[in-house]
Image: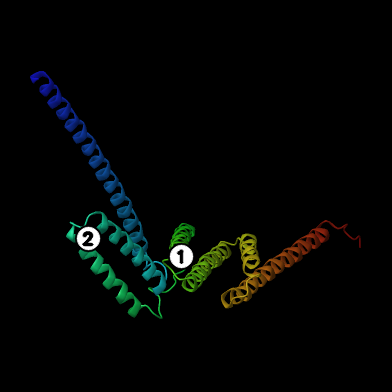
Amino acid sequence: MNIALIAGLCVILLGLIVGYNILAQQRKQIESHKRQEMAKHIAVIDATEELIGNAHNLPYSGTLLVCLNKKILDSLKAMYEIDDSDKSIKQRISATQAQIDQIKQSYSNRESTSFKVPDNDRQAISMLKLVKRLRSVVKAEHSKGRLATQAFVAENARLEKMQLKINIENVIKRANDAKQKGQMGTAQQLLKKAIDVVSPKTDDYSQEMKKHLEQMHSDITHTLNTGHEKLQSEQEEERSDLDELFAPKKKW
C-alpha cells in the first residue's frame, strides 16, 4: 500500500513538473513573441519619425504629415495592447494624438517648406529616394484603409509631380553647368531628354517647363550653329590666305 501511494505521488509530482515546464515554455514563447512584436513596432516608429524629420528638406503636405503621425499612433496603440503596464506608451499616445490635431489645424492649406532645387546629382538622388519612400508609405496606408482614397490620389499625384520637379530642375542645373564649361553638346542632350519627359504631360508645371526647356535648347542650338558657321568662315579665310600666299608670282 505504501509503495502504491509513493508511486502515485511520484506520478503526480512528475505530472506537475511536466505541466510546469510546459507552462513555462509557453510563457517563454509568449514573452518572446511580445518582444518581437514590440521590436517590430519600434522599428516602424523609428523609420516613420525619420521620414517626418525630413519635412524641412521637402515640402510635406498636411495630409502627408497626418498620415505619418497616424502610422506612429497605430504602432503605439498596438504596443500598449501588448504591454499596458508601460505608462510612457500611454503618454506618447496622447502626445501623438495632440500632434495630429495640431497638424490638421496648422497645415490645412500649406506645406512644411518650399521646394529647394538640388545642388548636385547626389542631393537629387537622395531627394528622389525620399519621395519614393513616402509614396510607398502612402500607398501602404491606403491599402490598409488608414488613408481615404481621395486623399491618397491627391497626395500620390503631388509626390509624383515632386519627383518630376526634382528631375527637371536638376537637369536644368546640369545643363547650365555644362554651358558654363563650354560643353554645349552635353547641355543640348540633357535638355532634349528633359523635353521628351515633359512633352506627354498636360499639367501646368510640365507645360511651363516644356516651353522653358525648348527655349534653352533653341538658344544652345543657335550658339552651336553660330559657332560652326564662324569656324567655317575662319577656315575659309585661312584657306584664302594660304592660296594667296602660295599662288604663282606674276612676272612683270
Which of the labelled discs sits on residue 166, or is there none?
none
Asked if residue 61 can be seen in this view, the reply is: no
Q: Is residue 250 left or right of residue 147?
A: right
Question: In the current view of this chain or complex, which residue is farthest to the left?
Answer: 2
Kindly identify the amino acid type of the residue bearing the numbered disc 2. Ile
Q: Is residue 106 left or right of residue 168?
A: left
Report the residue at 27% width, 47% height from top. Answer: 35
Question: For the residue labelled by badge 1, is the local secondary structure a helix, a strand or a loop?
Answer: helix
Residue 140, quarter of picture: bottom left
Which x, y percent locates residue 28?
24, 40
Asked if residue 146 can be seen in this view, the reply is: yes
Report the residue at 59% width, 62% height from top. Answer: 182
Q: Is residue 116 above or below residue 15?
A: below
Kindly identify the amino acid type of the residue bearing the numbered disc 1. His
Tally of marks: 2
| Nearer to the camera, 240 or 96 | 96
Q: Judge the density around disc 1: few (<14), some (14-19), many (≥20) Cα neighbours within 10 Å.
A: some
Residue 90, quarter of picture: bottom left
Residue topped by disc 2: 89
| Nearer to the camera, 204 or 237 | 204
Report the residue at 27% width, 41% height from top. Answer: 29
Residue topped by disc 1: 142
| Nearer to the camera, 129 or 192 | 129
Question: For the residue labelled by badge 2, is the local secondary structure a helix, a strand or a loop?
Answer: helix
Residue 200, quarter of picture: bottom right
Q: Quadrant of the C terminus?
A: bottom right
Q: Quadrant of the N terminus?
A: top left
| Nearer to the camera, 146 or 2 | 2
